[in-house]
Image: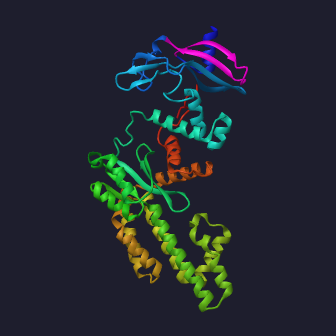
Amino acid sequence: MSANRIWKKLLTVERAVVEQVEIDQDTGVLVARVRPAMRERGRCGVCRRPGRGYDQGRGRRRWRCLDAGTTQVFLEADAPRVACREHGVVTAAVPWARHGAGHTHAFDQQAAWMATECSKSAVAQLMRTSWRTVGAIVERFVADRDAGLDRLAGLRRIGVDEISYRKGQRYMTVVVDHHTRRVVWMADGHGRVVLEAFFTALGPKRAAKLTHVSADGAQWIADTVAAHAPQAVRAMDPFHVVVWAAEALDAERRAAWNRARRQARDAATARALKDSRFALWKNPEDLTDRQQAKLTWIATSDPRLHRAYLLKEGLRTVFAIAREQDASAAVDALDRWLSWAQRSRIEAFVELGRRVRRHREAIVNALVERLSNGLIESTNTKTRLIIRRGFGFRTADAVIALVMLTLGGERPTLPGRQLAPA
């Protein structure tokens, strides 16, 4: 094997000729002087079509390559300019780097892979570059990966949700495709105006092809979907419905605590009720022996609170029936639960019953279609992990770039390696 082929393999450059490799005595870095192969010369840096030579540009320039052990490596080559019919006078393309980038494809690929696995600060330290440069590499990688790709094409079943990414009520709106299980759209902010921006990008023709939309009970989502995709079946996420029941149960627990503390003046009972939150919230199959004993004590000492607990479990059972039996049985169970809540004389659950009744159609759709926002809740959990791993982000764009890199398509692989077979 020739020395040229060996250096090309070590430097991860293809369609190029390695002219000379030496150590820069001033900086101590390894510099490989290269030139594009004959077929790669004289091409527009933007569209890569052949162009007419214009001038030599600003002379020779360098591109950062992957390190060789502990030594930094740079590629050095001429950077002439060409006249492109479409893009005018631009720097000629090189096969080892993107247009306008100061790093090779392999360097970008490794930095992008690391950004999906660890914090930007760790990537910057290992790759010996800056935090901002890592962000720019992520954006370049996503743009290159998604070039010519229409993420919103072929959407039929989508999930919509919002996620808090920063203190001070800072939210982002997320749209996930239930079929591909990928994030297809994200934007800073939440509310009807932001979601309408999604439907504007989607367009009326593609919006008319949506069949299902899963979401929580936010009215701005329901109104926007009804305005732009009235034919879509809107499914109420079961998780949020059960959360409503847990909140109603906690409201009754606090009321029971106040009754024991103020009316009965029973400090011991009040303290025991105050410490019963987890026993009431947890699913029966997950209770510890101590929590099971606490629940038994509640059943004998405060029947009203225990009835509230049974109402919470009854609503959770409705969705379990839909999963394990059939939708019609679950719908019947839901109607029986609504009647039970209305007759319970527990204010928090009477109000919950009214709330569930207002969203009954969307909840029934979730039971029948077995559609939930579990996928998008998983996406939100991974997004929070990205935020924690980055120790916070100053802008939503930085979060969105990393989320789209990690959850919006094929994840980057390390240079020279292939994805493991599924």
Q: Position of residue 44 (x, y in %)?
A: 42, 22
Report the residue at 43% width, 35% height from top: 146
- Of residues 113 and 368, the one drawn nearer to the viewer in this rendering: 113
The single residue placed furthest to the top in the displayed view is: 2
Reply above or below: 91 against 171: above
Q: Quadrant of residue 280?
A: bottom right
Q: Is residue 158 above or below residue 28?
A: below
The image position of residue 62, as x and y in percent, is 59, 23
Left or right, 256 with respect to 232, comes to right
Is 115 in front, or is 408?
A: 115
Q: Is residue 170 magenta?
A: no
Residue 327 appears in the rendering? no
Left or right placement of residue 309 versus residue 69 in this view: left
| Residue 197 seen | yes
Residue 189 versus residue 330: which sits nearer the camera?
189
What is the total number of numbered labels drawn onto the structure image? 0
Q: Residue at x 65, y 67 (%)?
A: 288
Q: Main secondary structure of the magenta part?
A: strand
* Residue 128 horizontal/vertical position (percent): 67, 34
The residue lying at 48 percent from left, 74 percent from top is: 311
Specify whether 213 is left or right of 266: left
Tell me which segment is drawn in magenta: 15-37
Q: Quick check: is 22 in the magenta stretch? A: yes
**Residue 275 lies in quadrant:** bottom right
**Colour convention:** rainbow
Residue in view at x 45 percent, y 24 percent: 45
> In which quadrant of the rendered image does the N terminus lie?
top right
Q: Is residue 265 above or below residue 12?
A: below
Measured from the top left, where is residue 355 in percent x and y?
39, 72
In screen coordinates, is 406 left or right of 114? left
